Image (cartoon, grey):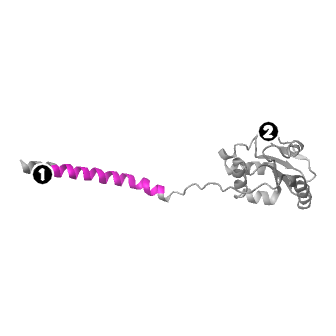
Amino acid sequence: MYRGLVGNGTRVVAASAVLALGTIIAAAPMAAAQMLAPQAKPIPHAHIYPDVQAAHTDIQAALVKARKEHKRVLLDFGGDWCGDCQVLNFYMHQSPNKELLEKYYVLVDVNIGHIDQNIDLGDKYGVVLKKGVPALSVLKPDGSVVYGQKNGEFENMRQMQSSDLTTFLEAWKPH
């Protein structure tokens, strides 16, 4: 009788060991994939927008530069507090957006405070700021508006891709 119990106990221990080993083997590829997979890095918070008082002179300087270089001016309305503005800035520094900006545009970051500053510039350049930021406006070197976002097209930039900005930059670059 004692011998039968030892035999059954050994079988139970052996079966448990096989099950545990099977679980480890089954989980190993998933654990390895998690270790090897690149982890999404958070977008670093950047200081993008200059003092609210700089906007008027920055735009005038950009228009002069755009005339000399035969480029368009891209106005980026937003604030450092804005998460979607941070994402847009991050995308602007990725290829091919970085190259498109350097080749075809003079970028001006327009600080709108907490949507209570430089509202006049949004109105002047065809952007409806109360629809959300970031908001972009594209100008010819003479200051005339080629395109202004009126419906908060980029206000949900966190849910968009870098390629959405690429499409925008390609669509409005000078021909």
Q: Answer whether labels 2 and 1 touch (C-beta < 8 Å).
A: no
The local crowd at label 2, few if under 14, some if 14 to 19, many if 20 or more residues have their Cα within 10 Å, is: some
Q: Amino acid at mark 2?
A: Lys
- Residue 151 visible in rendering: no
Residue sitting at 16 percent across and 49 percent down?
9
Locate residue 137, reporting x and y percent: 83, 47
Whether residue 138 appears in magenta in the rendering, the answer is no
The answer to whether 2 appears left or right of 31 in the picture is left
Residue sitting at 67 percent across and 48 percent down?
161
Locate residue 90, reporting x and y percent: 70, 55
Helix, strand or loop at mark 1: helix
Nearer-the-camera pick, 70 or 37:
37
Locate residue 51, reporting x and y percent: 82, 55
Whether residue 29 appears in magenta in the rendering, the answer is yes
Locate residue 22, reporting x and y percent: 31, 52
- Residue furthest to the left in view is 1
- Residue 57 bears which disc, if any? none
For the record, the magenta segment spans: 9-34
- The secondary structure making up most of the magenta span is helix
Which residue has dot 1 on it? 6
Helix, strand or loop at mark 2: helix
Residue sitting at 43 percent across and 53 percent down?
30
Q: Amino acid at mark 1?
A: Val
